[in-house]
Image: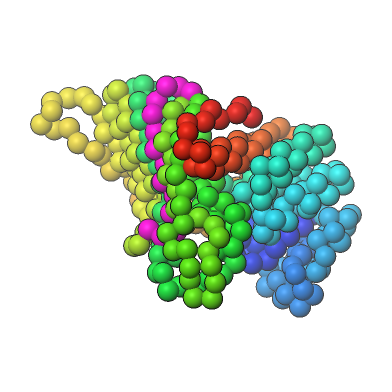
Amino acid sequence: MSEIGIGLVGGGYMGKAHAVALSAVAAIFDTALRPRLEVVAATTRDSAARYARAYGFARGTSDWRDLVADPKVQAVVIASPQSTHRAIAEAAFAAGKPVFCEKPLGASLEDAKAMVAAAEASGQPNMIGFNYVRTPATQFVRQLLADGVIGRVTWFRGEHTEDFLSDPDAPATWRTMGRANGCMGDLAPHPINCMLALMGPVAELSARIETVHPTRPGGTVDNDDHGQLMLRFASGAMGHLYISRTATGRKMGYAYEIHGTKGSIRFDQEDQNSVHLYRAEGPEATRGFTRILTGPAHPDYLPFCQGPGHGTGYQDQIIIEARDFLTAIHTRQPVWPTFRDGLAVSQIIDTAFQASDDGRWHAVPEV
């Protein structure tokens, strides 16, 4: 086994999650590469030093360029605001270093395309952080669909609904300014990545994207609060996706329902260790949805816990991501989702804005 020096850009909410994951991943999964926490970058020297002490990095810096250039940093994890992603990733690839980048890939479709170009020109391993799709439950659902358990899929309904801005008296903040920080830029990438993983490419879509509360104490809201997409997948199946940060009562409504010719599947991230499966077989009187509790028989569950139904949590999803990134570096083989998969998400978001602006159905360009 070998060590690999890690540089982490951003020490806040997601930075902490990645630091904890990198510290734990080798013990959980017995990875061939063992992360060595070298440098953490933050906006000030004081915060960088504080993060370095708290998370166990050798040192901190207020300049991400210093982190990328450090010879002890052999791979870079980006957990800073999306407006910074492109410059950091391009510099890291130019330095010949693998990159893991939090979602979304960049602050725009142009950023995402440039980042994919830089990644593929460098030949370095690259991944994007879509953690929710890595729960044992959703990995199991992907297996069920691949195995044809519910037959030919005919319909998909997905959502990502939260209520952190449902109160119209909540003050204006950075989240209410700039298209990249709106609901479509912040929440939508997760369920879009999920539906692509479960359903395959989208052929065409129509959309409505709106601001629910145009003014708030302290300022005007200039980005979106919620949006809905009608979808036609390349498979021919129909679908619908709703994304909202004003869905009163919803805390982590990353949920989906899938209908097929032989059954149906339901999942809700607020109950992330359960899958509800309906099989259209046997007497009608005894048919019904079965609640399946995840356990050691499901993907990536056993390394965390030997007890069925005991469950995994949010941090465990990030640890699975860290395992995948280390695997990509060690094997020099792409591990899903790569930057190109992140570009596919950005393309759908961009197309949805176009469709919302003109009220028409739009074909989704291939990535």
* Among the 4 quarters of the image, the one containing residue 297: top left
- Nearest the camera: 64 or 215? 215
Residue 9 pos. (x, y %)? 73, 60
Which residues lie in the magenta part?
Answer: 234-247
Does residue 80 show up? yes
Q: Is residue 11 above or below residue 280?
A: below
Residue 333 pos. (x, y %)? 71, 32
Residue 99 pos. (x, y %)? 74, 47
Residue at left offset 46%, top offset 38%: 359
- Nearest the camera: 361 or 158? 361
Residue 123 pos. (x, y %)? 80, 34
Horizontal side, residue 136 vs residue 91: left or right = left
Most extreme residue toward the left is 285
Horizontal side, residue 39 vs residue 273: left or right = right
Residue 243 in magenta? yes
- Nearest the camera: 245 or 355? 355
Residue at left offset 75%, top offset 69%: 43
Residue 32 in magenta? no
- Nearest the camera: 350 or 26? 350
Residue at left offset 28%, top offset 24%: 262
